[in-house]
Image: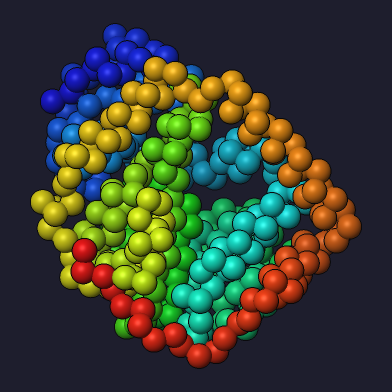
Amino acid sequence: MVKPKFAAMFLRTDSEVDLSRQISPCPVCTAHEARLVSATDRHGKPLTTMMCDACGHVFNDPVPSAEELAAFYARDYRVSYKGAARPRGRQVARNFGRVEQFWADWGHVLRGRRRILDIGAGSGEFLFFAQALGHETDGVEPNEGYAAWCRDDLRLPVRTATIEDLEKSETTYDFIRLNHVLEHLRDPVEALERAARRLAPDGVLYVEVPNVEVYARVKTRGNMFHYGHISNFSPWTLRAAAGRAGLAELADTAGAMQDRTAGFFQRASSWSVESARKPENAQRVRAALEAHAAAGPSLLSQAAKLARKMQGNIELTWIAARMGSPRMIGGYYVERLAAGGWQPASRHEPGLTPSRT
Ligand SMILES: [Zn+2]
């Protein structure tokens, strides 16, 4: 059942959207009850986005075909999404800074996990850190430009390949990272299953995606949805998708991660479709989207955000100019992490067991 009223708060009128066709089942919980939440993308172009009433998952409908997606990524993605054909020094520095923060916060989870795979390695900063800290690294990246950047500029073993290509190999890994990848894929549960099959028996999968509730709070009004982001997760729907794929969150990190669309997972028994459904979550996500549609963030908070960004850009530009090559920039951030007292450890930390929630 489609309820068009909600979408009227966004920028396009309902009459322009064809609601007569059958909507797609929810990619997380398979329910067919969904409501229209937006009829345009962040640039005002037509894009139909639905929210599942059963679990609160927000997804583009129809899901583009594999051929449409391949054409989009081959042709448009790198320039239209990142605004440049190659990462700029400032962008490289910003990415390294974010990865440094990840290792400072969560490096203990990776201790003793020798073989690391990054699925959707992007511009390679995570694998650069992993290699510098003594791990064996492997990466796949579907975008030829990014994959070549990883190989040529960072000297990392990154193949131009997709998550589907991993099925051709029997290799398993002690740690796999799926960072800002899942939201781009046609079937998030299937993608998580594919990643889980490449985990060693005690292996850990890290998944992180954008949070639709945070977007609703911080994005300017109507500037939320994107053709390339097929799924828009909330903390619950990420865990539900992982549960359906036979993954359970590590008990040691679950508390710290509970409000985030990120988590560390290990293989466990799969959730039923019913377990993935949670109408309270749908109500919560709906409230966040309605608040966004009604107001969006204040001008003052947007101005403060812009000022912080400009200040950050000055620092990043300075670091990039001083260091020169991408590897030198990466080395600066690895050294900064070590100088902060962070030590790579070869010993496996005991006690990292899946939670039963
Ligand atoms: Zn659902």
Q: Residue at x 17, y 45 (%)?
A: 278
Which residue lies most toward the bottom here?
A: 347
Q: Position of residue 117 (x, y in %)?
A: 49, 72
The answer to whether one can see residue 76 in this image is: yes
Q: Quadrant of the C terminus?
A: bottom left
Lateral position of residue 331 relative to residue 270, left or right = right
Task: Please determine whether, in this image, residue 213 is positioned above or below residue 300.
Answer: below
Name above or below for residue 197 compared with residue 271: below
In this rendering, does residue 46 appear at all? no
Q: Which quadrant holds the N terminus?
A: top left
Vertical side of 271 occupied by 26: above or below = above
User: Which of 287 and 265 lies nearest the eye of the viewer?
Assistant: 287
Residue at 31% x, 78% y is 353
Asked if residue 312 lies left or right of residue 3, the reply is right
Q: Position of residue 259 (x, y in %)?
A: 37, 50
On the rendered structure, is 274 left or right of 323?
left
Residue 221: x, y in percent?
48, 21
> Residue at (56%, 77%) from the top-left corner?
137
Name which residue lies at 71% across and 33% down: 307
Q: Position of residue 127 (x, y in %)?
A: 60, 69
Residue closest to the eye, 123 or 212: 212
Q: Is residue 13 left or right of residue 87?
A: left
